Amino acid sequence: MCRLTEGELEFVFEGAVSARKFDGRDHGLSHCMKAVDFIIEFQNQYLFVEIKDPQNSGATEDRRREWRRKLVSGQLDQDLKYKYRDSFLYEWCAGRGDKPITYVVLIALDSLDSALMVPRQDQLARILPTGAPEPWIRPMAQGCVVLNIESWNRTFQDCSVRRRAPVRRRSNGFSP
């Protein structure tokens, strides 16, 4: 069992061979490549996981509205595409990525419903692309899914996510 956290979200990956935070210091190429948040390896596949949490305790209502506008307009799709492609290239150049890869985008927003998730998922699958177009002999991505927390927990029953209590900052005794 592997555990990872991203902000206020905690993930448990049952049955994973490995689970690692990918967009941190170890990536080493953040000056020229984007990175997904996590790479999870299972016996027969990888999950590349990107997490967006516009509902975290530090988000203002204006920020949530702006974030939703980017999602609905498709503007977010381009950023998600490059995060996957750069991560795929990085792993391929490192001699990994030898199993099928599914790109999972978790948008931790309770108001996100299938009417918003399905078009984003379809567009993302188109622009990655998923499948193996001619003359490729293997796909860049086996597939992709866009999920909220509830649909993540239904889809990945052995890989749960939950929201933890917000992390409180310690006071140093001084007023700002």
Image (spheres, rainbow, N blue to C red):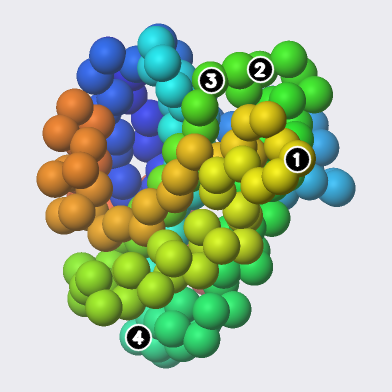
Q: Nearer the viewer, mark 1 or mark 2?
A: 1
Residue type at tag 1 = Pro
Which residue was labeled with disc 1? 135
Q: Is residue 116 left or right of residue 71?
A: left
User: What residue would you read off at disc 4?
Assistant: 61
Residue 150: x and y in percent read 16, 55
Q: Return the disc, 4 or 3, that comes first in the chain's sequence.
A: 4
Q: Earlier in the sequence, mark 1 or mark 4?
A: 4
Kind of residue indicated by mark 3: Lys
View extreme (front): residue: 134
Front one among 119 and 175? 119
Question: Farthest right residue?
Answer: 32
- Residue at 85% over, 47% down: 31
On the rendered image, what quadrant is the N terminus found in?
Answer: top left
Q: Residue at x 41, y 16 (%)?
A: 44
In the picture of the structure, the residue carrying the numbered disc 2 is 96
Pinpoint residue 35: horizontal percent, then vertical percent. Answer: 65, 44
Q: Which mark is residue 33?
A: none
108 up-or-down from 103: above or below:
below
| C-alpha gap between disc 4 and disc 3 | 41 Å
Task: Give the amino acid type for the residue marked by disc 2 in the picture.
Answer: Arg
Label 1 and label 3: CA atoms lie apart by 19 Å
